[in-house]
Image: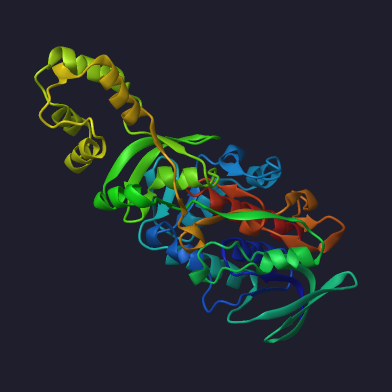
Amino acid sequence: MTYDVVIIGAGAAGLMCAAQAGYAGKRVLVIDHANKAGKKILMSGGGRCNFTNLATTPQHFYSTNPAFCISALKRYRPEHFVELVERHDVDYVEKTPGQLFCSTSAKEIVRMLLTECEWAGAEVALSAQITRVEEQGSAMRLSTSIGKIDAGVVVVASGGLSIPTMGASGFGYDLARQFGLEVLPTTPGLVPFTLSDQWKARASELSGVSLPVTVNTRLKAFNEPMLFTHRGLSGPGMLQASSVWSPGEAIEIDLLPQHDAQALLHHAREHTPKRQLVTWLMDHFPKRVAQSLMDWYPDGNDTQPLAQYSNSQLQLWAERLNRWQLKPAGTEGWRTAEVTMGGVDTQSISSKTFEVKGLPQLRFIGEVLDVTGELGGYNFQWAWASGVACGQAC
């Protein structure tokens, strides 16, 4: 079997790349060990796939080489993908500003990509194992469960380590190392935090409760909701923070974002001195959270009126509300992580063609590279952009 382009991985980046290379007149094969194409697409966004973000800029991505993503993102923008979606009559909604989701099911995006591959003449082989990839002069040879395959170009779109139940593996990283590329340390990203001891029990008691918060990490602040879980803290704010968090670090959570808790408390003491602190808290938080805050701290008193709170006591409560300090025990790890931080070092990759410098018949795209987006459709936009750039250059 001989192909111009063989793409390893039938995910977002791989299928997009296959269609582009096929339309350019190349004979293309996509090969994947999974029994279904686009598995991660299907489960993303609660099954509705947050397929892009209209506000995408390079600033929404993490990489040790931050300039690398600029070229591809500039050449294939969110509006280009929206045009493709509309051409295939996929209905979509903008759930929050910039974030576009399928109206019904992520299956529509997978159907669209497979249709594009079919129209472009690209073949897709599933449930196929790759046992070896080797250089064959100026081409490549793959040993697989469906036979030996010769390829002018091999594109690695095998993804990262997140959600192993979807078939994620370190195959792409092993292949990169085989050909002498550096693989930067990988960690789970966009993943819930776990807590230990008393804080785990406290979070568990509030499981299912969501609050608007600002979470501050050493590198960045995120103004998005937080969700209490049986194991710790989740929700968009915590997922975002996890991508820039290092084990052992504390995070600071503002439970009253854009409000000065100390000023509010002083105002309440002056104007409603007979009021109890717990009833004031219930004005700003769900009842369960307000009562829990009183229970967590020994100086909390359900019957004591605000008039009896000193300035120093109000300051202490204000710090708890505006600067709640918490040290996560860890994260839920690869099992629930949405993305992989780190990956193949982009210093060895062309930002224009995605070929390995000095070995143009080998290319890497998508999540396997050290380029990771924030939450909100950015990672899919990177998959589309890197897939298009590589596919058109094959």
The image quadrant where one finds the C terminus is bottom right
Between 91 and 64, which is closer to the camera in this rendering? Answer: 64
Q: Answer left or right for 76 relative to 40.
A: right
Tally the marks: 0
Whole-percent x, y for residue 355 in the image: 78, 57
Reply above or below: 214 against 118.
Answer: above
Residue 12: x and y in percent read: 56, 62
Residue 384 in view of the camera: no
Q: Is residue 331 left or right of residue 80?
A: left
Q: Nearer the viewer, residue 140 or 326?
A: 326
Task: Look at 65% across and 42% down and name the residue there.
Answer: 74
Here the colouring is: rainbow
Please, is residue 8 above or below residue 240 in the view?
Answer: below
Q: Could you say which is closer to the camera, residue 338 or residue 149?
A: 338
Q: Residue at x 38, y 59 (%)?
A: 46
Using the image as rendered, state which of residue 189 and residue 6 is in the foreground.
Answer: 189
Residue 13 sits in quarter: bottom right
The residue located at (49%, 71%) in the rendering is 165
Look at the image and tell me whether residue 368 can be seen: yes
Quadrant including the N terminus = bottom right
Residue 321: % across, % down: 31, 30
Residue most extreme to the right: 137
Name the spot of residue 382 as percent of width and height, x first. 60, 51
State the residue at coordinates (38%, 48%): 235
Most distant residue in the top direction: 270
Q: Answer with left or right where residue 356 lies relative to residue 119.
A: right
